[in-house]
Image (tube, rainbow, N blue to C red):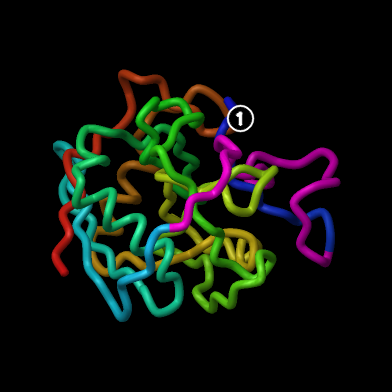
Amino acid sequence: MKKLMTILAITCFSVISLVGCSNTSTKEQAVATTAATPTREPVILTGKHHVEIEVDTLGTIKVELDADTAPVTVNNFITLANNKFYDGLTFHRIINNFMIQGGDPLGNGTGGSDKTIKGEFKSNGVKNAISHVRGTISMARSAQSYDSASSQFFICQADAKYLDGEYAAFGKVTSGMEIVDQIAKTTTVQDKNGTVAKENQPVIKTIKVID
């Protein structure tokens, strides 16, 4: 149940695979989370929705979510935000020129909410045309289970299209990428995997649902 969340950037094969890579770089590791039995949220949202991620002392990242493409993911994210789940959590894993990852209540890459959701991406039988480019928001998950995403998410600081079809992208940053850049460039990390010591983790003050 305690598998470190890591984002798998697969470059070992021409056909994307989650296993079998040798000598993988940091960007070729998957976001690992607890592989609990998936619990599907009632799908009630459609269309575009907007949230604001307020990062303590740094400012606000505005995000547009696409519930037509990833309804289960968007519904889960908005439900957690409305329930104040993210308030006071952090960005615990940061890799400059790749992504910033947060939303773990334990702050170490092993935590989540009390639910997991279906992975809305091609390898899991779900059409998802949102590409992992700069500004894309997507769900972290366990490398062992497609349906293991819970609360942890990441925002791409740079294009990472090799993640397409393997992770549930569900929206894009519309304002505040300079804050993502600042977090990625200035946060002290402990290793090449982007581990951030608790005292250095940027704090998510709140995620406000606009509509």
- The magenta segment: 14-40
Quarter the C terminus occupies: bottom left
Residue topped by disc 1 = 3
Q: Residues within 10 Å of mark 1 (few under 14, many from 20)?
A: some
The residue at 63%/46% (across/down) is: 27
Across and down, in percent, residue 150 comes to: 45, 46
Quarter the N terminus occupies: top right
Q: Could you say which quadrant of the image residue 63 lies in?
A: bottom left
In this rendering, the answer to whether 130 lies above or below 86 is below
| Position of residue 182 in the picture relative to residue 209 (left or right) | right
Task: Inspect the magenta stretch and tell me whether residue 20 lies in it.
Answer: yes
The residue at 76%/62% (across/down) is: 16
Across and down, in percent, residue 96 comes to: 47, 44
| Position of residue 48 in the picture relative to residue 94 (left or right) | left
The residue at 39%/38% (across/down) is: 113
Across and down, in percent, residue 87 comes to: 20, 38
| Amino acid bearing label 1 | Lys
Q: As rendered, which of 26 and 91 lies closer to the eye?
A: 91
Q: As rendered, which of 207 and 21 lies closer to the eye?
A: 207
